[in-house]
Amino acid sequence: MIIRDVKYFSLLLLATIECMCVFSQQPPLRFKMFEPGLLKWADIRSITLAKSGKLWLGTAQGLVSFDGNDITYMSQFNKAENITTDYQHIESFADDGLGHIWFAAGDNIVKLEIITGQTFTKALPYYDSTNTSKRYGGHNPYMDGEGNLWVGLGRNGFVLYDTARQKFEHYNFDITRPGDWRDRYHNTAFYFMEDPSNRNIVWIACYGSGIYWFDKNKKKVFKNFHAANKKDSCWINTKVTMLDAGKDGTIWYSTWGNGMGEYNAKTGSYKVYATEGAFFGIENGIRQLFFGGIIPSFCKKSDEEYYVARKDTLPAVFNKVTKKYTYVHDAMLDKTLPQATDMKTDTRGNTWCLKGGRLFISSPKYRMFKDIPFKNRYPVSRDGVELRDIIWDSVNHIYYAAVQFSQG
């Protein structure tokens, strides 16, 4: 069932629609709480910016879309209204650019028609020959440029789903292991990304053993991932949470415990850049990094910088040249709010930050409505005012708003 919130219009939206500026030309980020209508009570888990320009939110109560004006809630929200749904606790999803959103729900993958709200469900296959009732569940779906859906299977590797033929292929990170092999640190696919220069290659972040790549022609997983300096090694390799592959063969990645990382796909070597408070220890006679900061996700600010979400502290800007972190100090982002789990920038230059299940927005410019009085004032006949229309003046680069019962 689809629930539509009333139209949300405020100064925040005006800034959201208007801002087309480059962040490097703007003052430091200033965040505001984003909580229109139904979102005031939502437990938001993830942010996705669709190819259509819509903002999609995965919440504990279901899936939400926001197009800058309308909020659409495709889930149960108010039990008093007897609204029900089969899809709740949606953590992440993929946009195929064809009017569909794909997500994992329990042991199924679901294709959602954005316009109609209709769904198509496909059960994930089982890979345990001894127990067909064992459930693994899917997570972190990714749609590649050929329309193939990649889905992690918890500790059981990942599946490649051909959406045209509706066929699954299952892979483990260790090809010598049986199909039902389960391992938290060596067989958990956490993030997928197609190589920007070669669509035959998909890079995969493994939560525990670094970065792999999958060759679509050879139908095989490969790995060449080693520390350029032994001190960058950890008690396990690296718990990678997100990737950003460049055309120059360099992959930047975030980790759960080692800060930001830089991986040379040509040589296979990686370096990590710890945050403040990092500590090292001695293992096998080598001084190694034991903890370097938890970064659940990051997004591009410019060619040289990333916005990074820091767990249990303020978000930061990471500079790829200096390898330094600069923290975003904003009173709105209370340090006591746990788990800065996601950050995204949209095509209008806005930065979204998910922290403690609450959504914050920072726009390059916050513009106020300027009252332009009429030459001949008329008495106000009502206490309330109603915004009836708004138009954009492309010459003067301002909005004109028509407000009923106002004097300007």
Image (cartoon, grey):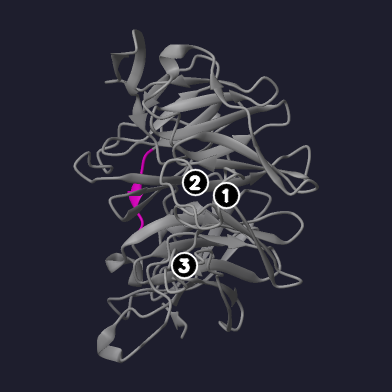
Does residue 68 appear left or right of residue 233 in this picture? right
Q: Which contiguous range is marked in magenta?
A: 30-34
Does residue 160 appear left or right of residue 82 in this picture? right
Q: Is residue 362 visible?
A: no
Residue at (34% x, 75% y) in the render: 379
Cα–Cα gap, marks 1 and 2: 6 Å
Residue 32 drawn in magenta = yes
Mark 1 vs 2, N-terminal side: 1
Does residue 249 appear left or right of residue 113 in this picture? right
Q: Find numbered disc 2 in the image and state the secondary structure of the residue it sits on.
A: loop
The residue type indicated by label 1 comes to: Asn
230 in relation to 402, above or below: above
Viewer-nearest of labels 3 and 2? 3
The residue type indicated by label 3 comes to: Thr
Q: Which mark is residue 223?
A: none
Viewer-nearest of labels 1 and 3? 3
Mark 1 vs 3, N-terminal side: 3
Q: Find numbered disc 1 in the image and state the secondary structure of the residue it sits on.
A: loop
Q: Find numbered disc 3 in the image and state the secondary structure of the residue it sits on.
A: loop
The residue to which callout 2 is attached is 187
Residue found at the far top of this picture: 285
Q: Can residue 288 be seen in this view?
A: yes
The residue type indicated by label 2 comes to: Asn
The residue to which callout 1 is attached is 172
Q: Residue 130 carries which label?
A: 3
Residue found at the far bottom of this picture: 82
Q: Residue 206 appears at what percent x and percent y?
A: 51, 41
Disc 1 and disc 2 in contact, CB within 8 angstroms: yes
354 in relation to 307, above or below: below
Q: Residues within 10 Å of mark 1 (few under 14, many from 20)?
A: many
Residue found at the far front of this picture: 130
Q: Residue 290 appears at what percent x and percent y?
A: 32, 22
